[in-house]
Image (cartoon, helix red, strand yellow):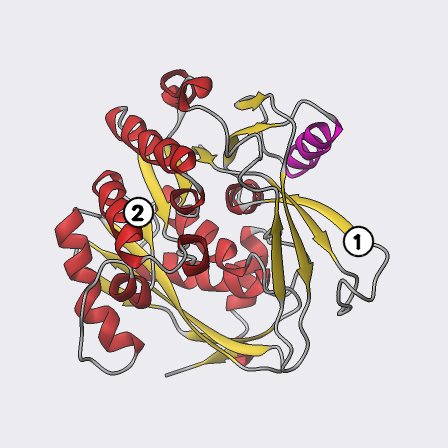
Amino acid sequence: MSKKVKAFGEVMMRLDAPGHQTLEQTNTLQTMYKGTGVNILSGLCRLKHSTSIITKLPDNSLGKAAISAIQSNGISVDDIVIGGNYIGKYFLENGFGPRPTKVIYSNRKESSFCTSNIKEYNLSKILADTDLLHICGIGLAISDITRNNVIQTAKIACSLGVKVAFDCNFRPKLWDNDIEEARKYYEEILPYVDICFMTEKDAQYILGYETNAKGSKNQINEVMPKVANRFKVGIIAGTIRDETTNHTGTLQGFMLVDGKIVYSDTLAYETLDRIGGGDGFTSGILHGVLKGLPANETVAFAVGAGVLAHTIHGDIPRSTERDIWQFLSDNRISIER
């Protein structure tokens, strides 16, 4: 039987410059409606889970367009609150070679979601039928309002016995590089988290864990058990990523469960669309946890999902369980280390 998964987070309008054009060059933009929660839930829908997004959208044509897009990806819209006038937007310029991909945000702090009050959501009722709730850490950075909403949502879910998955998604620019301020709120939410997505850099940079270990694996082995023990987080998962400027890279996943760390093989990939690759990995981990798969199978599946997400235009992972296992069975794309 599929599990009921919900996500609390912002839905944004993505506006793409065609191909590899800059915004200066183009007079047309492609519109999509995305967001971390939408992306992960869409991936889980394709893996046969029941999903719903908890958010607020404006009472106008933009809100209606967003709802239509969400429904088209199989996500329930029953938990969406309607009100306000704005939706957050981001403009995307796809990089090429040494020119990086650029994301430019607009109207985020003024959006219906980012100005909403936690009482609007009636979370005790919304979460009553929920097995797992996903929360994105970006909400901690945007404003005092979103910060309070995110933390209160985690607390309410925890009190109801709902498993909480939290993605650090740390963005230094959104915090104006004020690490001490960020640390305070990350430390406040982590005690309510069952599944945390973070890298060894997050543990060092946000939470202040120091290490003299060399290399990502050695750093993960040293700092992640400390994070898990301190905050009583049962599962921590993340990736080791190595990218070049010619749209190629490698991805390896790790998963800490009950104090033991499991690593996947390292997979090589080419990037069609970088945005949303991490959400593919997250949906894979959550799928494995919900199905009760062993840690080694879960992290292998998640890396496969993440790699395939890089090959699909748009933020949303669109691979089925069969697609991912078939991809992983092809040893030609695997790098054994």
* Secondary structure of residue under mark 1: loop
Q: Is residue 68 magenta?
A: yes
Q: Which quarter of the figure is the C terminus placed in?
A: bottom left
Q: Left or right: 5 with respect to 269?
A: left
Q: Residues within 10 Å of mark 1 (few under 14, many from 20)?
A: some
Image position of 307 with respect to 124: above or below: below
Secondary structure of the residue carrying numbered label 2? strand
Q: Which residue is mark 1?
A: 29
Q: Position of residue 204 (x, y in %)?
A: 25, 66
The total number of labels drawn is: 2
* Magenta span main SS: helix
Residue 195 shows which numbered tag?
2
Q: Residue at x 45, y 44 (%)?
A: 142
In the image, the segment drawn in magenta is 61-73
Q: Which mark is residue 269?
A: none
Residue at 24%, 73% (x, y): give it.
Answer: 219
Q: Is residue 320 magenta?
A: no
- Image x and y of residue 137, in percent: 39, 47
Q: Position of residue 101 (x, y in %)?
A: 62, 68
The residue nearer to you, when weighing 118 against 272, is: 118
Placement of 262 over or under 44, stated as above or below: below
Sooner in the amino-acid sequence: mark 1 or mark 2: 1
Q: Is residue 246 visible?
A: yes
